[in-house]
Image (cartoon, grey):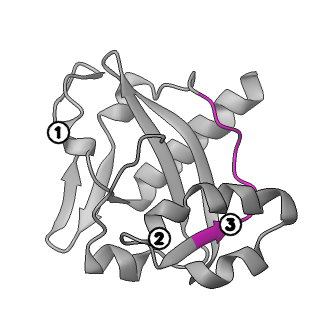
C-alpha cells in the first residue's frame, strides 16, 4: 500500500476554501521553498458524488484515494486543470522573506528565514491562508518559471 498522509484543516480554513480560491503545493528543500503547482478551486462536492463530476480520465485518481474516504474525507476539492507539477521553481530569497499568512489574530511572516534561506520547514507544516501580496508572489514565481522553461 502507498503512503498516506493527513492534514488538519481547522474550521476557519474549511470556511475559507471556496470556489475561486487557489491552492498551492509547496516543497521545502535545501534551504529553499519551491512552488510545486497551483490549482483554482472550481467546486467542493461530496466524495460520493465526485465521480460524476470528474472527467473519465480523472476518475481512477479518485479511486486511488478511496481508502481515505473511510477515514476522514467526506468532500473533494475539484478544479480546472492546474499548473504543471514542477520541482525546480524555488522562490527567490527576497520573496521568501516577504511571505505572510493571515489568520484570526492577524498576519504572520514565515518563520526561520534568514538571509533569504529557509532554515527550518516547521512553520510551513499545515495549511495556511496566504496574504494577498504573498499569493501574488507565489503565483508570479510559478508564471515566471513556466515562461523560462
Q: Which mark is residue 69?
A: 2
The alpha-carbon separation of the residues under discs 3 and 1 comes to: 30 Å
Q: Indicate left or right for 63 with 128 as reference.
A: right
Magenta residues, as a range?
77-86
Q: Nearer the viewer, residue 139 or 22?
A: 22
Residue 87, placed above or below residue 41: above
**Comes first in the chain, label 1 or label 2:** 2
Residue 33: percent from left, percent from top: 39, 29
Residue 63, placed above or below residue 78: above
The alpha-carbon separation of the residues under discs 1 and 2 comes to: 34 Å
**Comes first in the chain, label 3 or label 1:** 3
> Which marked residue is nearer to the observer: mark 3 or mark 2?
2
Q: Indicate left or right for 41 with 116 as reference.
A: right
Q: Nearer the viewer, residue 54 or 101?
A: 54
Badge 1: few (under 14), some or many (20 or more) residues near its Cα, within 10 Å? some
Residue 94, placed above or below residue 23: above
**Is label 2 in a helix, a strand or a loop?**
helix
Residue 66: percent from left, percent from top: 55, 64
- Residue at 67% across, 39% down: 143
Q: Indicate left or right for 148 with 100 as reference.
A: right
Residue located beneath label 1 in the image: 111
Asked whether residue 59 is in view, the answer is yes
Amino acid at each position: 500500500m502507498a503512503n498516506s498522509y493527513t492534514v488538519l484543516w481547522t474550521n476557519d480554513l474549511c470556511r475559507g476554501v471556496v470556489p475561486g480560491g487557489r491552492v498551492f503545493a509547496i516543497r521545502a528543500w535545501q534551504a529553499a521553498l519551491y512552488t510545486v503547482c497551483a490549482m483554482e478551486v472550481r467546486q467542493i462536492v461530496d466524495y460520493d458524488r465526485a465521480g460524476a463530476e470528474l472527467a473519465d480520465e480523472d476518475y481512477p485518481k479518485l479511486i486511488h484515494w478511496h481508502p481515505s474516504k473511510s477515514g476522514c474525507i467526506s468532500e473533494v476539492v475539484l478544479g480546472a486543470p492546474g499548473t504543471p507539477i514542477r520541482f525546480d521553481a524555488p522562490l527567490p530569497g527576497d520573496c521568501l522573506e516577504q511571505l505572510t499568512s493571515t489568520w484570526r489574530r492577524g498576519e504572520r511572516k514565515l518563520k526561520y528565514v534568514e538571509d533569504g534561506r529557509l532554515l527550518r520547514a516547521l512553520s510551513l507544516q499545515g495549511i495556511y491562508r496566504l496574504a494577498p501580496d504573498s499569493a501574488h508572489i507565489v503565483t508570479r514565481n510559478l508564471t515566471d518559471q513556466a515562461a523560462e522553461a
